[in-house]
Image: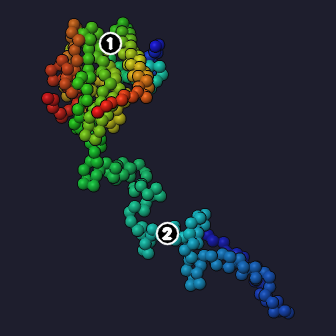
Amino acid sequence: MKHTAEVVEYKKLSNGQFSVLIRCCANPSTDSWHTMAAEVLADKKKRKESISSAMLRVAKQHEDAMKASEAGVEMMGESKEVDI
Amino acid sequence: MPINPETLGWSRAPIVDVKTGVVRPDFLRYLQRLEQKTGPTLTRRGQIEATAPISTRTEGISTTVHRLTSAGLRTNADQVAADGATFARVTLDQRTGGGRGFVALDTNNRLANSFRANPVNVSSTPTSATVLSNDGVATAIPIAASTQQFGAGTVSYNSGSVDPGVFGTFFVYADDPTFAGGAVTYVFTTTTPDQTAAEGRVYFGKITTSAGPATTGGGNTGGTTTGGKGGKGFEVL
């Protein structure tokens, strides 16, 4: 399934690190902060890779959560007869 | 507010018709208006009736004042706010004082529960074996969604990640001063005292990363990182 992860917030931390808030499919329940060292942010290539891998992680987790949710719905009504 | 009594201009004329001896209509109307006002509000003894409402109010005066003593004092300290629950003035200075104490303390004057303490002082155990991980390829450290068991209950945190940009050993924490959980901003550090450098600090553990092998840390075991467990104040088997 297609997911769209995007950076929706950005902040500089008091210790010099930077954080971006990544949200998948505009769903706030997927919100996930990714914190980077200033050196990572300063290097365009490193920054891209770092944020890209964080976005991938968030999207995968969203997919897993959706699958788990669907599995939960599918389980509804399941029954088993037991002789004891 | 001044009270404007009814004018008595009609009284300049005789109250009773001198020819017939009958009471004049103006006087009768005055008496009627007087009775309309005083009848429902005064007893025969001149006391205020309990059902008499105060102007602009609908309840009887006994309802309005029944929580006042004969000395004009409140019957008890609870009779402060109409909601029956706000026992301090609702101005900010009161809420930051006694009002907060009322909420946070129990009947033994202890904190009502550990969620009323600062997170840095509260014991907690991560419910997962590990929370931090690194694939040995990139320097990023994904932090799995996790739950911390506190004395007062559990708090769940969204997943996140930190990227120090280099391999090494890092402490990971987040500041959550109100035990709100959810999406917190994870922070990494190599400075040991940072683990306890804020009142709201929640510790997620330590991880040692290196190019090559995948490693783990945090959680209630610390994974592949020696002494890497998160939380505080618990032991492992």
- The kind of secondary structure element at disc 1 is helix
> Chain letter of disc 1?
A
Q: How is the image coloured?
A: rainbow
Residue at left offset 26%, top offset 47%: B111
Q: Is residue A58 visible?
A: no
* Disc 2 residue type (three-letter): Val
* Disc 1 residue type (three-letter): Val
Q: Which mark is residue B65?
A: 2
Q: Position of residue B151 (x, y in %)?
A: 25, 40
Q: Position of residue B60 (x, y in %)?
A: 56, 69
B99 or A1, which lies in front?
A1
Q: Which mark is residue B155?
A: none
Q: Is residue B80 visible?
A: yes
Q: Do the residues bearing badges 2 and 1 touch, measured as CB atoms within 8 Å?
A: no
Give the class, few, some or many, for how many residues have Cα within 10 Å of label 2's Cα (few <14, many ≥20). Answer: some
Instruction: Judge left or right: residue B178 versus residue A70.
Output: left
Q: Which mark is residue A40?
A: 1
Q: Position of residue B9 (x, y in %)?
A: 76, 79
Residue at left offset 43%, top offset 60%: B80
Instruction: Judge left or right: residue B57 versus residue A79.
Output: right
Residue B219 lies, with reference to residue B48, above or below; the image says above
